[in-house]
Image (cartoon, coloured by chain):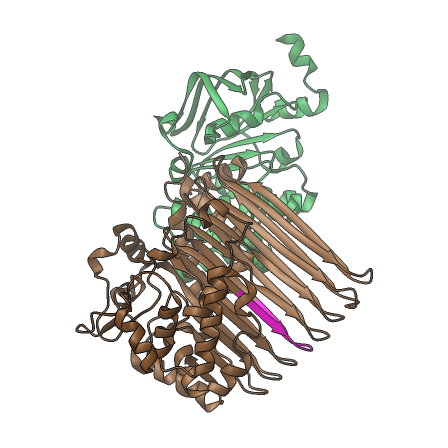
Chain colours: A brown, B green
Amino acid sequence: MTEESQEIIGDYRYGFHDPENSTIRFDKGLSEQVVRDISELKNEPEWMTDIRVKAYRHFAERVMPEWGNCSLLNMIDFESITYFLRSSNKTENSWDDVPDDIKNTFDRLGIPEAEQKWLGGVTAQYESEAVYHSIREDLEEQGVIFLDMDSGLKEYPEIIKKYFGTVIPYSDNKFSALNTAVWSGGSFLYIPKGVSVEMPVQAYFRINAKNMGQFERTLIIADEGSTVHYVEGCTAPSYSTDSLHSAVVELIAMEGAKIRYSTVQNWSSNVYNLVTKRAVAHKNATIEWVDGNIGSKLTMKYPSVLLKGEGAHAEVISVAYAGEGQHQDTGAKVHHLASNTTSNILSKSISKNGGRSSYRGLLQVTPKSTGCRSKVVCDALILDEDSRSDTYPTMEIGNSTSDLEHEASVSKVSSDQLFYLMSRGFTEDEAMGLIVNGFFEPFTRELPMEYAVELNKLLELEMEGSIG
Amino acid sequence: MADEILRVENLHVNVEGTPILKGVNLTINRGEIHAIMGRNGAGKSTLANVVMGHPAYEITQGSIFYQGQPLEELAVFERARAGMFLSFQYPASIPGVQVGTFLKKSVSSVRENPPKGREFRKELTAAMEQLSMDKSFLSRYVNDGFSGGEKKRLEILQMLLLQPNLALLDETDSGLDIDALRIVAQGINQVAQDSACLIITHYQRLLDLVKPDFVHAMIDGVIIRTGGPELALRLEDQGYDWLDVTA
């Protein structure tokens, strides 16, 4: 710690707290000093501290987005949030504090108790170290680097310095600025040239080592001709006492590389989930975002792809489920910045019990990017009269040699479908569950099997007691 | 003594406030095949749907009994689990739900001791072979993009697997070519041996292959005449006007 900062901390009421139980945390609220303290505590290189501080200043000045669900956004109280928390062997929460409905969902999904406690935020560890290590060893043999972001910065500062913030600069939006200022945790994944990682790389295993923060920062670089599938998240509800989750995920696919990034997230209904995800695809590279959003109070997330090199391809497949009191504002953005680039966007949403889902999409083809093709399909399913779905597509097409298709549909579950299924022995809830799982099937089939099974079970649970 | 499966007593039914059935009486015992014939709009499909419990149909008078039990107490899925089956005239499609998964789940819900694993697959394969259905059916989505004939075959496949006590077949013969009709008829005959069967049809041609014990002519929401197979032949030949006159 520098003398200067110690001095400031001396007076500063948001200093370190409660070191006896080996937990380091900051009190609520954010200032430039808190940002500096976080960086200091992590022993980060100066350039990272500088980025954080610049990002903080930008965050402080930047106004809230004036689009989307402003009334919900403006309810965020940045002063009531804890921005940094690191626990070593003791955690903050008690199992008793985890709400019963979440515990019940764990039980009904058949999740083992140890895992439940991790999901409930009570413990940071549920997989055996042995499993973790064997996966790590396989990856290391291929030259793959897979670390939590903090360790990545320590061990590979030159790579991080080169790419950090190049896809999503802190000035991109208020929440990318916030994340850049206070980020902690997340994944750093580097795949060397020509390496194909056969097994999906799961954030699961990494979580053993470090507690995943609410401001995680992920950077994935797939070098030329390499392939990787990264899977993050879990279908069981992630209980968080803190109400803001704001991650930044940057992907870089070099020439001929392919990155698939699959996420299924199910936040408890007090959480604001405001995530910036963006990828760059160089020549003939492929980026696939497979993105599932369940739960939260408000999710705003639009996985994006910059198709920078000729022949690059983007796939964005997303689903959103909005239940009572929830707003899923999700979608996709694809920028065709080079010729003969292609993209497919498939977005499916379900709204129930007054939930609201919005598709917000941007498709851009620059004037010089000739011969591009894109297909956008948005399907919304509304399960009752109280629920809502909207679509906000934007298309900026700069030339006439490109071929674009856009299809959108809004449907309701028909009484004929329900009657048909019920006449085959399914209860009304079971029938709803089947219809809903079927609706999400084009997404679910892209997931690794265990995730698909969990997601289907979860949706079936969500349908219980849904309708009279 | 006859094993009574279905008894319909003086049944009056409204659809969106319009009376469709106006006093239907019908009793079907196990082992019997009944056919109901009539013009479009006579109320044939309404009868099948109301017996199965379609929520859009309102019973204003009369009762339906299934194995002696009043049906109004049973929800649609309970009727299915009690052994009632309706082969739909227009089966709904369920996009994203594979036929194989759907059949497995349905059989598990409906049958008392559902076959498991290999036993189920064996039964399924046999039934599909009987109906000349290709295995690729199983990975398609339920009725999604199916031709009319494919839909009807899937209905009959379900009937074979669910082994109902009461089979209601609503215009199962429409849209089938003669080969398909033969295959479907064979399926119906197999199930009809141990169950009660109600066939709703416009045409005689299915009744050449599935021999009814009773034929009912329905006009304007009532069964106006009941006879044997010869009634079906006469209706096919002469239409319904002669019944109107005698009515």
Q: Work out whether A422 lies above or below A124.
A: above
Is any part of residue A323 visible from this angle? yes
What x and y, as percent, mark residue A36?
38, 74
* Relative horizontal placement of residue A277, taking residue A404 as reference (left or right): left
Q: Work out whether A441 lies above or below A447.
A: above
- Front residue of B73/A88: it is A88
Q: Main secondary structure of the magenta part?
A: strand
- Front residue of B232/A233: it is A233
Query: Which quarter of the figure has residue A247?
Result: bottom left
Question: Does A285 lie within the magenta span?
Answer: yes
The residue at the far right in this view is A400
The residue at the far left in this view is A20
What x and y, as percent, mark residue A130?
31, 82
Q: Work out whether B231 lies above or below A282.
A: above
* Relative horizontal placement of residue A186, taking residue A309 as reference (left or right): left
Magenta stretch bounds: A277-288
Query: Which quarter of the figure has residue A117?
Result: bottom left
Residue found at x 66% / y 25%: B233
What x and y, as percent, mark residue A111?
31, 62
- Front residue of B55/A98: it is A98
* Relative horizontal placement of residue B83, taking residue A130 as reference (left or right): right
The residue at the far top in this view is B246
Question: Does A237 lie within the magenta span?
Answer: no
- Front residue of B243/A100: it is A100
Residue found at x 58% / y 42%: A411
What x and y, as percent, mark residue B31?
45, 34
Quadrant of the image for the N terminus of chain B?
top left
